[in-house]
Image (cartoon, rainbow, N blue to C red):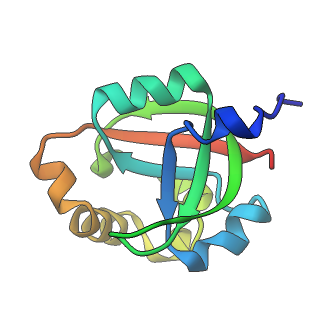
């Protein structure tokens, strides 16, 4: 089992934001993968620290932390490399919706980040607190 970092250190952990309706699946272990276009420096920091805060809330405004996770893997690859296995770990019924719909939706959600040429980090995680 991973050691949970002290609260003072956790305040400096990178954060990954989710929609509020994903919380139940994350806490139940049904959603264990989150692809995000982010800067290489952010991705390297996440790899180095090995933990992250999971949050939800408004796009602009104070987020609410709902979990601390251990990062189990980070792979950098584009959205269009998604597989059916990936979709099963992303949850939210993506396995039933298909790869093409996923690529279209995530590209739309992350247009600004993709326009900055951020690579997509496929972040696998497990909840530890």
- Looking at the image, is 46 positioned above or below residue 31? above
> Is residue 100 found left or right of 113 in the rendered image?
right
* Number of marks in the rendered image: 0
Indicate whether 65 appears above or below 123. below
State the image coordinates of residue 124 (x, y, percent, origin top left): 59, 41
Q: Position of residue 101 (x, y in %)?
A: 33, 72
Work out whether residue 90 or residue 81 is closer to the camera in this orientation and state it.
Answer: 90
Q: Quadrant of residue 69?
A: top right
Please, which residue is most extreme toward the front here? 8
Residue 44 in picture, x, y percent from top left: 42, 23
Q: Is residue 48 left or right of residue 44?
A: right
Residue depicted at 32% across the width and 25% down the height = 41
In percent of width and height, residue 127 lies at 75, 49
Residue for point 46% across, 66% down:
62
Q: Is residue 14 visible?
A: yes
Do we see residue 82 in this rendering?
A: no
Q: Residue at x 38, y 49 (%)?
A: 36
Q: Which residue extends farthest top?
A: 48
Single out the residue that lies furthest toward the bottom: 21
Q: Is residue 103 left or right of residue 49?
A: left
């Amino acid at each position: 089992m991973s050691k949970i970092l002290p609260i003072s250190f956790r305040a400096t952990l990178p954060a990954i934001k989710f929609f509020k309706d994903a919380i139940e699946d994350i806490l139940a272990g049904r959603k264990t993968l989150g692809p995000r276009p982010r800067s290489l420096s952010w991705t390297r920091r996440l790899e180095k620290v090995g933990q992250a805060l999971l949050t939800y809330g408004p796009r602009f405004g104070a987020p609410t932390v709902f979990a601390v996770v251990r990062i189990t893997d980070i792979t950098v690859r584009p959205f269009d490399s998604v597989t059916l296995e990936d979709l099963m770990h992303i949850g939210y019924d993506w396995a039933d919706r298909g790869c093409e719909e996923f690529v279209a939706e995530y590209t739309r959600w992350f247009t600004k980040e993709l326009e900055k040429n951020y690579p997509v980090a496929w972040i696998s995680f497990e909840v530890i607190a």
